Image (cartoon, rainbow, N blue to C red):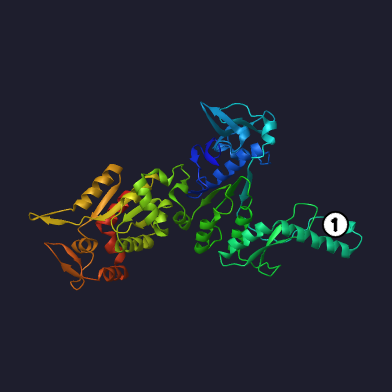
Amino acid sequence: MIRTVEFNNFRNLNRVYRIDNKLNVIFGKNNSGKTNLLDGIRIAFSAITNDYCKIKKSDFAESDDSKKIVIKVKMDPDDIPSLNYVNGHTIECGFIVEITKTQKGRYTKKVFLYDGNTVDYEILREDEHLPNIYVIPLIRVDEIYTDWLSTGISAFIESEEKYKDIKAESKKNIKTAMSNKIDIFKNFCSKFNENFDIELTEPKITDEKVFIVDGDNEYNYNIGSGYKSIANIILNSMDNSFSIILIDEIENHLHPSLIRTLIREIKSLNENAQIISTTHSPVIINEVRADELIDISGNKISDIDEENVKKLEKFLHTGRSEIVFGDNIILVEGYTEELLIKNYLYTNNYNWTVVNVGGIMFEPYIELATILKKKIIVVSDDDVVLSSDKKTPSSRYIKLQNYCNKKGVTIVNTYNTLESDLYKNGIISGKNLIKKEDCDIYVAKQGLKTLIMQELILDDDFDTKIDSWHIVKEIKNEFGNN
């Protein structure tokens, strides 16, 4: 299993990635390098498996091929015995690939042990532990039959009847040999409530091709693209030998319910496989463990402290998962704040991501946004309390304020509660909705919080009123024109 991959001068990648789980999900913005990471792993392993993988000038950083590309792969000891080396008193495993341009303009790949020593290529080529690399692209299983031979087998058989007998017997024998795998495949598909089976093309003097059928409909072209996508992933994940499976945008074509089932089940298909995938989906982020998530910047969500990791794994849901994809993050503590700010940013087309942390549990989300180097602002009630005829923020707010200051995060407060702040600043009115408590502290009457927001949002002057609100002004000041 891969532990780390380090890139130097490869496209836009110049860092170390810890890819040390059975399932590893890479997330990040478009054009940030996610696909490059998968391509880099494929190129590195092609150097030891001797598979063809073309190197282009654009593979070099800024297309400058005067400098060499270096890719370092660290693995578990004995994963590939011919790549073991001694480090002090321990056996470790790994390799380095260097890609350089020759004087004749060609690109060559050289392989070294991770410690820099020479690799014995004869031993390497005979190593039975070399992994199978499966690249699952965006092109999915679409065709069930391809005939590219100019002369068929029937030309060498005495009669058409004998040819048909040979074909039938060949299919029968192949399917018998595949029966265990077919059962696994069918059982897996049943978890998606689908009756998929595996069929064969006509036997040829080449590696036999398989195709997917829907129940008894042997030549059904109408299987949906999402199920074709899942079937393609399953078929390429069933090899029991050491395999590395690279999937670009695992969620492509998939409904959220299919994504959830796929993520939960895919790990059980091949105990010897390591899966490395990219994603743009909050559903994927929500379905995997924190230690399986890797930002394209190289950070892992599990790098934050253990207590906050546990909270994120328990309380992070699809809506909150958007925090890893946004640029300008606004953390709010309640539904009404989320509703109000989201409606404002929608009508004004601001690039803000509003995340409702649910109650007052800001800390784990601040930690997450900080490690991902996001612009972040916290909006919280200060819950003022009256003590000795003096109104002061609550101890809860003061603690949060100190925490934000320590993290370098801007925090803005609403006076006591959202409704009290809006009323005090003349954004809302209506004595029938608001009641007065101590001094000039006003709160929503029982059960009317949502009604207050509804009336405000549906007001024709909503944008004008909210644009003058001090909370919006402070958010705009923090994020500029984004």
| Residue 353 visible in the picture | no
Is 287 in front, or is 421? 287
Amino acid at pointer 1: Ile
Q: Which residue is mark 1?
A: 153
- The residue carrying pointer 1 sits among few (fewer than 14), some (14 to 19) or many (20 or more) residues within 10 Å by Cα, namely few
Taking the view exactly as shown, the residue that stands out farthest to the right is: 158
What percent of the width, then of the height, locates residue 88?
A: 51, 26
Q: Is residue 347 left or right of residue 437?
A: right
What percent of the width, then of the height, locates residue 40?
A: 58, 41
Q: Is residue 397 left or right of residue 309?
A: left
| Residue 34 visible in the picture | yes
Q: Where, by quadrant of the figure, is residue 456 drawn?
A: bottom left
Position of 89 relative to 148 (above/below): above
Q: Is residue 60 left or right of residue 343?
A: right
Q: Is residue 212 left or right of residue 359?
A: right
Is 349 in front, or is 97? 97
Which residue occupies 27% across, 63% down?
465
Which residue occupies 62% across, 27% down?
118
Position of 404 relative to 81 (above/below): below
Position of 315 relative to 60 (above/below): below
Is 471 in front, or is 52? 52
Which residue occupies 60% across, 26% down?
117
Label 1: element kind: helix
What percent of the width, then of the height, locates residue 13?
A: 52, 39
Is 82 in front, or is 293? 82
What percent of the width, then of the height, locates residue 396?
A: 22, 52
